[in-house]
Amino acid sequence: MSVILTAVATLGAIGAGSAGILYLISQKFKVEEDPRIQEVQDALPAANCGGCGFPGCAAFAAACVKAESLEELNCPVGGQETMDRVAAILGQTASKTAKKIAVVRCSGTCEERPRLNLYDGATNCSIAAALYGGDTGCSFGCLGLGDCEESCAFDAIHINPETMLPEVVEDKCTACGACVKACPKDIIELRKQGPKSRRIYVSCVNKDKGAVAKKACNVACIGCGKCQQVCPFDAITIENNLAYIDDDKCRLCRKCVVVCPTHSILELHFPPRKETPPPAKEEAANATA
């Protein structure tokens, strides 16, 4: 009996001693956390989407507290309202940022970009892109296998079964950038949402020369430069046979849309254009005839 009591006492002493040592170590190496980190985290939407560039809301909150300025920090899900709350907690000022939205820079539907073969493999864009250029003549366009759809935590992007192209649900898109990272073809981009959701952009990423691009897709950009010539704001550049519109410079005048011969420049949510009446001489000639 005394042996059992001795063993219990010994184990108890060892346990108590270990607990004491662990306590002393924890006190020596403990790290005091700024209580503002939890306050900032509570002000965030808790989406943990990584759109801010950090692994989650906790890491973003810590970065905000440690930063001298919030100029380079932004929560795309919470938007300006959330950043203003964070700034108020930290006694700083949040820079004004334009709301962004994901846009799909490919208009190569089944009608515009005919299929040349049938892909019968893993239904994954990353795998398909690593194996071959795609089942059409355009090796730059969307594969339509839905990596972007699977990556979205907000149910904001879906593959249209008829066009086989992704479509963004604007009311749900938070500009977290998950679909941008998921697309192996780099056809999804975050752009300014624009006033009244009006946007103009080149819906093509094909860098082939004009004739080759046009043969592969009817609505491919051919790099002709007509859009660049008519832009009064120097918002369009031509590089690698492809036009690109800078949304910081674009003033939505829509002159480029009219002159594009392949209709690869899209205009979204604009009012219908007014029809231009025929010249007076032409009307008189028609009346005489």
Image (cartoon, rainbow, N blue to C red):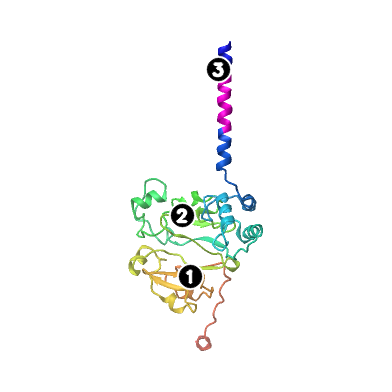
Q: Which mark is residue 133?
A: none
Q: Secondary structure at mark 2?
A: helix
Residue for badge 2: 181
Q: Secondary structure at mark 1?
A: loop
Picture coordinates of residue 9, whole percent (x, y): 58, 20
Q: Which mark is residue 7?
A: 3
Q: Which quadrant: the N terminus?
A: top right
> Magenta stretch containing residue 19, yes or no?
yes
Q: Is residue 257 above or below residue 151?
A: below
Sooner in the amino-acid sequence: mark 3 or mark 1 = 3
Picture coordinates of residue 288, whole percent (x, y): 51, 89
Point out the stretch of residues depicted in magenta.
6-20
> Magenta stretch containing residue 165, yes or no?
no
Separation of residues labelled 3 and 1 (CA atoms)? 77 Å
Residue for badge 1: 246
Picture coordinates of residue 249, whole percent (x, y): 51, 73
